[in-house]
Amino acid sequence: MKNQIPYKIYLNETELPKKWLNLRAFMNKKPAPLLNPATLKPMTKEELSSVFCTELVNQELDETTPYIEIPKEIREFYKMYRPAPLVRAYCLEKALGTPAKIYYKFEGNNTSGSHKLNSAIAQAYYAKKQGLKGVTTETGAGQWGTALSMACSYFGLDCKVFMVKCSYEQKPFRREVMRTYGAFVTPSPSNTTNVGRKILEEFPETTGSLGCAISEAVEAAVTSDGYRYVLGSVLNQVLLHQSVIGIETKTAMDKYGIKPDTIIGCAGGGSNLGGLIAPFMVEKLQGKENYQIIAVEPASCPSLTRGKYVYDFCDTGKVCPMTKMYTLGSGFIPSANHAGGLRYHGMASTLSELYDQGLMEARAVEQTEVFKAAEQFARVEGILPAPESSHAIRVAIDEALKCKKTGEEKTILFGLTGTGYFDMVAYQKFHDGEMSDYIPTDEDLQKGFDGIPKINL
């Protein structure tokens, strides 16, 4: 069996993960705690519960329980599209002429088109269980908003989505999918919140950012009875839910005796990367393996490769808890010409800490190179990848081409986080030669750094 690797490795229903993996429980040096911006003391359960669902707060603060049971209702929903396939990219290997073996975990086999549904259904479940009327959130490229609208529809919850303005305008079809599932979608920043009006007054021509949208979504939640705020990335609870990606991947690989040398994931806030690497990072932390783990981010929003590892606000309006992370500053707004998602100004605290400890690498790539890789992958593998996913594809191809030069038979694993069928405006700009690369100068980044609070702890 170990020598007969099929194109697609499917686990059966009984192999669906029964527990989420809490990566922090395996870390000797834990991520720094969330801070109350008013007191600069760690956020308490009571303080967080005014914004987030109570059980999600418990998960957010839990850094000692290695595995957390997945409720039956969530597992039943997962069965509609999980386990997700692990695919051997034979056609891509052949096209590249590489001796490397390339595998990808495909997370796009659901209507939302991405991995985001893994956490959306969990967060909607806990909101329903708490008896809430609805939830608020932000979305950048739209995958998270789409997934959450689906999950809320499933549980009969209201869903209010603040969508980054440039994405709202560039990706109308994803917006309409959200509305199809009953979500209320507002371009951010907007005139519907105090923080939105303040941002528009100061920056009337702004194209928006995830930081802006988060501020609006939080305000909408805390000022509406029966609502809580939910987030699609960055938080510990989200990385926890996304661990199903890595658990399934490792189970499938172990089943066929496959061990990856290099593991690659795109990185915006860190949800899919954290989920994919979770069981592999545990082995690395325990000294059992020494995987090469690479986070790939856009050169136009380079939080890991050019950011600062400090406490910062999670949102532009500075109403959220502060977290220690690699950040470009909460006021940083990526160029409007950036079409590839991954627009958040910071990185998940867990991944930031792992990166700071040297347990993973980071690379920044330019978007025209990303779309070249996306097109090459689509032509030989038959899946049109999301622009976000294509950051990982870019580096996977680069690593495979290195193997072509050296003759090394490396095994490469990357996360294909979703499909790009709602991202055709970006593909059109690429094909029409209208897409350009933007790399912020040191002066551009300094504007964001200047807004980072000075905290001495």
Image (spheres, helix red, strand yellow):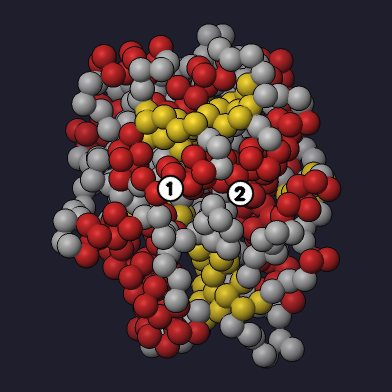
Q: Which mark is residue 360?
A: none
Per the image, label 1 sits on a secondary structure element best described as: helix
Q: What percent of the width, then of the height, locates residue 35? A: 57, 20
Does residue 163 lie above or below 301 as drawn? above
Place residue 148 in its image quadrant: top right
Quadrant occupied by the N terminus: bottom right
Front-lying residue, 350 or 233:
233
Provide the residue designation for mark 2. Answer: 117
Q: In terms of sequence position, does the residue under pointer 2 or pointer 1 come before the other? A: 2
Furthest toward the top, the residue is 39
**What amino acid type is highlighted by mark number 2?**
Leu
Front-lying residue, 242 or 349:
242
Contact between marks 2 and 1 (CB within 8 A): the answer is no
Mark yes or no: residue 257 visible: yes
Could you give the CA–CA distance between mark 2 and mark 1, rounded to whole angstroms? 14 Å
**Would you say 73 lies left or right of 401 here?**
right
Does residue 191 lie above or below 258 as drawn? above
Furthest toward the left, the residue is 433
**What amino acid type is highlighted by mark number 1?**
Arg
Per the image, label 2 sits on a secondary structure element best described as: helix
Residue at (30, 40) in percent of width and height: 169
Mark yes or no: residue 454 visible: no
Provide the residue designation for mark 1. Answer: 174
Q: What percent of the width, then of the height, locates residue 10? A: 69, 74
